[in-house]
Amino acid sequence: MSAPPLETGPSPETAPDALAGFTVGVTATRRREEFGALLERRGARVLSAPAIRLVPLAEDADLLAATRAALAAPLDDVVVTTGVGFRGWMAAAEGWGLSADLVGHLSAARLLTRGPKARGAVRAAGLGDHWTPAGESCEEVKQYLLAQDLRGRRLAVQQHGEPLTEFVADLRSAGAEVIEIPVYRWLPYRDMAPLRRLITQTVSGAVDAVAFTSAPAVHAMLGAARAEGLEERLLAAFSGTVVAACVGPVTAAPLVSRGVRTLQPDRARLGALARALARHLPEHGVTRLVAAEHHLEIRGHAVAVDGELRPLPPAPMAVLKRLAERPGHVVSRADLRTVLPGSVSRDSAEHAVEMAVTRLRRALGPSGIVETVVKRGYRLACHYGPSSQEPSRQEPSRQEPSRQEPSRQEPSRQEPSRQEPSGREPSRPGAGS
């Protein structure tokens, strides 16, 4: 008896609409177009905000000086942290006329490669690798070296982007002479305006996730936020509803040290990071409910009404999300004023709430989803009984950052309500919240 055919359809994390309705900020400089395309193919709206730039190797006097120091005497061990960094070092040495001398020194040394990409770059250069840790971490390399007698040994440590301060200090404390090879030093991006905008949008909750592909990019974003007086609010956003997605533990370290829970893929690759976001956001960033017999799926900057995705401006979306926190219950105008973007006076805020509700009703399409409760406020037309569907939003797993769970209570009685025929509530003198 033959086995049933396997399903060949796309998995949820690779589906073209997996990230539809979600906004993701991308801080990468190198390969940002490639990574942005991975997210956009899954339906995401991508905000590109490069945080850092590379110092050209040929112009890097520090790298040249470190290379000459490494060539001044034989090397015992060379730590290769990244494939792209090692290839860049070899290419720069060739440009300076030092390639043959460098290859000779490396051939006589033990080459410790942090991961498979670094190992591949070493082998592609015609060199042999001595050892690679299973976990692809610098900490494993350090512990491997510290388990040996390092007194009098001469080591070169190829860095990538930022100094390995603790790593180098521990090796020196064990008696080794360590030469730091600063390949690909990072500097702040020349145009910081996109990054500052992304910080503001993250703090305000206008983005659902920010993706980081290097630790220097994390430091750059935190530094830019600090300069604007927004660092603590940025960290609070990452600890709340905005997902901090990091390509691996090295990238995540600056956020983890500040108490931020991060989303990381199983493998430190861009494709794996895109798949992790496409899996996590729909599972933990969506609220599903039924209002006026219509199925709503609230996600990011859009809402799907009976399966049709409808993008919403910030104000109507903020109102909808607040109403969805207590479906079927009245939410006062005073409460809704607090979630509107920007700061407005009390009088103008009253009108702003009415306009946001009007725009929300128009965007939703079918009438009756948002009801007006005279002199009290608004509510979603959700009436739950024993056989009705409860609004669902799945609990986050322990391996991924938690998303705030709206509180829900059963309505104790049916509130009097009415829906304005035009979808717009006329202003009434003295109408309170």
Image (spheres, rainbow, N blue to C red):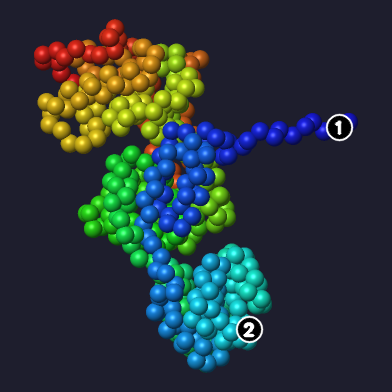
Q: In this view, does 274 lie to the left or right of 299?
A: right
Q: Residue at the spot x=23%, y=13% of the render?
A: 425
Query: Residue 53 location, x and y as percent?
Result: 38, 62
Q: Residue at image x 59%, y 72%?
A: 113
User: Residue 123 location in percent, x, y?
Assistant: 65, 72
Q: Which residue lies furthest to the right in this view?
A: 1
Q: Label 1, on which residue? A: 2
Q: Say if residue 36 shows up in the picture.
A: yes
Position of residue 81 measured from the top left corner of the image (x, y, whole percent):
53, 70
Which quarter of the image is occupied by the C terminus?
top left
Between the C-alphas of marks 2 and 1, the distance is 56 Å
Q: How crowded is mark 2: few (under 14 residues within 10 Å), some or many (20 or more)?
A: some
Quarter that holds the N terminus? top right
Mark 1, secondary structure of its residue: loop
Residue 260 is labelled as none
Q: Where is residue 143 in the image (x, y as percent from the top left)?
A: 54, 75
Q: Is residue 109 visible?
A: no
**Vertical placement of 409 versus 164: above or below?**
above
Residue flagged by tag 1: what amino acid is it? Ser
Q: Residue 240: which quarter of the image?
A: top left
Closer to the camera, 310 or 5? 310
Above or below residue 347? Residue 248 is: below
> Residue tagged by mark 2?
107
Badge 1: few (under 14), some or many (20 or more) residues near its Cα, within 10 Å?
few
- Residue depicted at 47% across the width and 46% down the height: 36
Q: What residue type is labelled 2?
A: Ser
Nearer-the-camera pick, 131 or 418: 131
